[in-house]
Amino acid sequence: MTTNVADSTWKEDDKLKEAMTQLVQQGLQRIEALDFLKRDFPQYPWSLRTLDRRLRHFDIFYNDKSVEVEDVQTAVGNELEGPGKLLGYRAMQRKLRQEYGINVTRDQVYNVMTELDPEGLEARGGIGAKKKRQKGNFTTRGSNWVNSLDGHDKLMGYQNSTFRLAIYGCLDTASRKLLWLRVWTSNCDPKQKHNVQKPNFDYLYETRVMAAMLRVDRGTETGVMATLHSFLRRHHGDLDPSDSVVYGPSTENQIERWWRELHERMEKYYKGHLCWLKDQGHYHPHDDKDRMLLAFIMIPLIQKDLDVFRESVWHTHRIRAQKDTILPDGVPNHMYSFPEQYGLEECGLPVTEEQLKEAATQSGVLTVPDDFLQPEFRAECERVLPDSETIRPHECRDAYIYLKNNFQL
């Protein structure tokens, strides 16, 4: 009697174990996890019973009863020192599962948060509460049919000039998955117009897939982006390239709703530290040196937290059915990867390396510096703070003050 090799080799497959662990930590339902495993590990036979058997073999559990409450308290306490203090217990549970590898139930996280931060938990209870619905609806054909791009200036302060901390992002409107987010010193300065296009170009170069259409506002920063998209879109011939860019106000952009989510669950934390530095006289918004010293501290710190929030909190949460939109409900990561499961289709269009190189040459997008600081300025910052990448969110004020007091240029 012969043995099926595929039935035995999976037991020694460390990549399979790691992938299954990550899918469980993301809180995906078993049938959703099965889609990813069939796609990424087609060499093995799959069914729900097979999945359960392999989870048991690897000792992977959706709810790990061996986790000590002290471990949960330590992780939650660590998050409450930073922007995690703005998260509700559902979002906190997702972050603990993915960032700490602690597979516990929402009730367990709720109990710990009630003990450590009862006032904060009660205050956050309104996040996500139902609000008056606006008229209108939004439809889509599927993943990468329309990518919504917009800038976010809440951290920049009064008239977008107090702090040099701007965010720009791109969202797939069907799945609501955030394709990229970038923090920079500006997202609307005409002199830095390529700083907005550069992360979008990098994303295209990495994935080699472009959206059928872009949705942007008529800001000064979007001209090059729209032109580059139309330039690449002309290769596909299914519509006039100029019709592949849809213009409209930011308030009607799909990504606008996500900015509110980000502000409530992460940005408020940093805004409190920024305002303290200004109000206490440590930071002067009209001093260029102060502005760039703050950028040196805050941009990588906020970018790191943005990436974690995007992957660990947003992409793995379950979007419920919405009355006024004809959009699927589910987990963004799963909806984006398997649109056919939701009656949609993959609408992305291929783009080649040669086409991207031609577009880069014509647009000049690759001429933009990769750093927001001058080399000499950065060198002096790194002399004072050689381990700046280890700064934690609650240390940002002290780090800025120390850097300013010891900066010698």
Image (cartoon, helix red, strand yellow):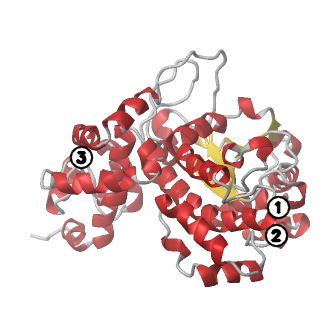
User: Tag 2 or tag 1, which sits nearer the N-term?
Assistant: 1
Which quadrant of the figure has residue 143? top right
Badge 1 density bin: few <14, some 14–19, many ≥20, Cα 10 Å: many
Badge 3 density bin: few <14, some 14–19, many ≥20, Cα 10 Å: few
Name the residue located 54 percent from the left edge and 65 percent from the top edge. 398
Which quadrant of the figure has residue 67? bottom left
Mark 3 lies on a secondary structure that is helix
Q: Is residue 242 above or below residue 57?
A: above
Where residue 6 appears, as percent x and y from the top left, is 24, 67
Which quadrant of the figure has residue 193? bottom right
Is there a contact, CB below 8 Å, between mark 1 and mark 2?
A: yes
Label 1 – label 2 distance at C-alpha = 6 Å
Where residue 206 appears, as percent x and y from the top left, is 63, 66
Mark yes or no: residue 97 visible. no
Numbered tag placed on residue 368 in the rendering: 2
Q: Amino acid at mark 1?
A: His
- In this view, the residue in front, 139 or 190, is 190
Name the residue located 85 percent from the left edge and 54 percent from the top edge. 189
Badge 2 density bin: few <14, some 14–19, many ≥20, Cα 10 Å: some
Which residue, given by chain and number where applicable, does mark 3 sit on? 48
Which residue, given by chain and number where applicable, does mark 1 sit on? 194
Where residue 407 appears, as percent x and y from the top left, is 68, 78
Name the residue located 55 percent from the left edge and 54 percent from the top edge. 306
Q: Nearer the viewer, mark 3 or mark 1?
A: 1
Label 3 – label 2 distance at C-alpha = 49 Å
- In this view, the residue in front, 3 or 357, is 357
Quarter occupied by the C terminus: bottom right
Mark 2 lies on a secondary structure that is loop
Name the residue located 67 percent from the left edge and 43 percent from the top edge. 154
